[in-house]
Image (cartoon, rainbow, N blue to C red):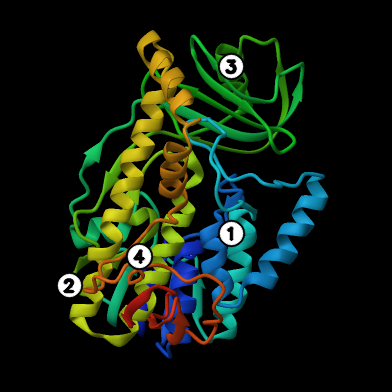
Amino acid sequence: MLSMKTTGDVIVVGAGPVGLLLACELALQGVRTTVLERLTTQADTIKAQMISGRTYQMLAMRGFGSAIDAVSEAESARLAWRPTGATGHFAGLFKLDGLPLVMLTQQALERILEARALELGVEIHRGVEVTDLGFDAGFVVGCDGGRSTVRKLAGFDFPGTGPTLTGYQAIVDLEGDLPRGWHHTPTGVYACGPLQGRIMTMEYDGPPATRDATRETLEASLRRVSGHDVRITAVHTATVWTDNTRQATTYRCGNVLLAGDAAHVHSPFGGQGLNLGLQDALNLGWKLATGDDALIDTYTTERHPVAARVLHNTMAQVALTRPDPHSRELYSLFNTLLDLPDVRKHITAMVQGTDIRYDTGSDDPLAGTFVPGLDLSDGKGTSIALDGAEATVRPDGYIAEVTR
């Protein structure tokens, strides 16, 4: 273990995608930024496999579009699979109808962001474990995950609900027939695909006894839930997850802030976690760079309700997928409701975050909404003509005010 004191304008703890994107945002604004990461190398555990269409639009406005497209196309070709038209799911109900998902593994995104951060002069130190917050820095931002050391050291409240299920996700070599798609059984839920060898199981009998996902535990869970005589011959990557659901009551305590999983944790239903964290970073970076306390405080004001809604809908998705008879009837009813256009539109916008509107103090219906397709690669805001009006756009792509 290595403890380290670093001098800089902002210290970002955690070199995952949220921390790296925040570092890029700060450096783009001319802020001297240092990233500290406990791991010595990038983690190869299976994590997010895609980003939402809205997140893609936001990264594209910063100039990452071409790099993401190249990696996404290469990965799709390698796996012989393209998510054409895929827009996500709610509790395994693939009826959402919105912006298409973009295939991009979390590891690939981290490599893109790290390269850009280094170009911008960000210092990245790996193998550094933070043990206190006595940095000589203007601000410290914890982007160090659900078990955030920064959050604990700073004393943030982190209320919520404990885990009630055990979930496994893995890429494996499998012998035996296993139907593709999502399947509900009397003992839980399992999924196979869409990527070759990808499996997932959920058992609703409490949290996992251990965080180890061995070949034996994966195979036993898959057999129990699916009822199929299958055998896992090799495990390429695996992870254990739960529905532990918690959120910091504020994202700022003095000069310490939180972003991503350090600020909020929830089950991975709907694939919202990575997108939520990246959008935290895009909201926080330009505000933090100003050093304006009142503006920095709007980070919590704007982003806390967005994450709270994700926590609520992921808890609802867990409830919908439970194997008991009452939950199965609820799932059936919800399946029918998603056939109604207004319901499908509402759920899609909620999961994808396309209906986010920040309160900017203006009553104009365009104020606080996102404008896709802009080139904000310099990290600065702009003014545009929109619907016969003049709109002032913030550095994160959201409209600050409208003059008609």
The x, y position of residue 154, in whole percent, is 21, 62
Query: Distance between the Cα atoms at labels 3 and 4?
Result: 37 Å
Q: Which mark is residue 254?
A: 2
Does dot 1 land on a helix, a strand or a loop? loop
Note whether 132 is above or below 80 in the view shown. below
* Residue at numbered disc 3: 220
Percent coordinates x, y for residue 21 in the rendering: 49, 70
Cα–Cα span, label 1 and label 4: 17 Å
In the displayed structure, would residue 28 be above or below residue 70?
below
First of labels 2, 1 by sequence position: 1
User: Mark 1 — residue?
Assistant: 42
- Near mark 3 (Cα within 10 A), the count class, few <14, some 14-19 or many ≥20, is some
Q: Quadrant of residue 172?
A: top right
Q: Which residue is mark 4?
A: 130
Residue 387 seen anywhere in this rendered image of the structure: yes
Tag 1: residue type?
A: Gln
Closer to the camera: disc 2 or disc 3? 2
- Of the 4 image quadrants, the one containing the C terminus is bottom left
Q: Is the residue 75 above or below the residue 245 in the image?
A: below
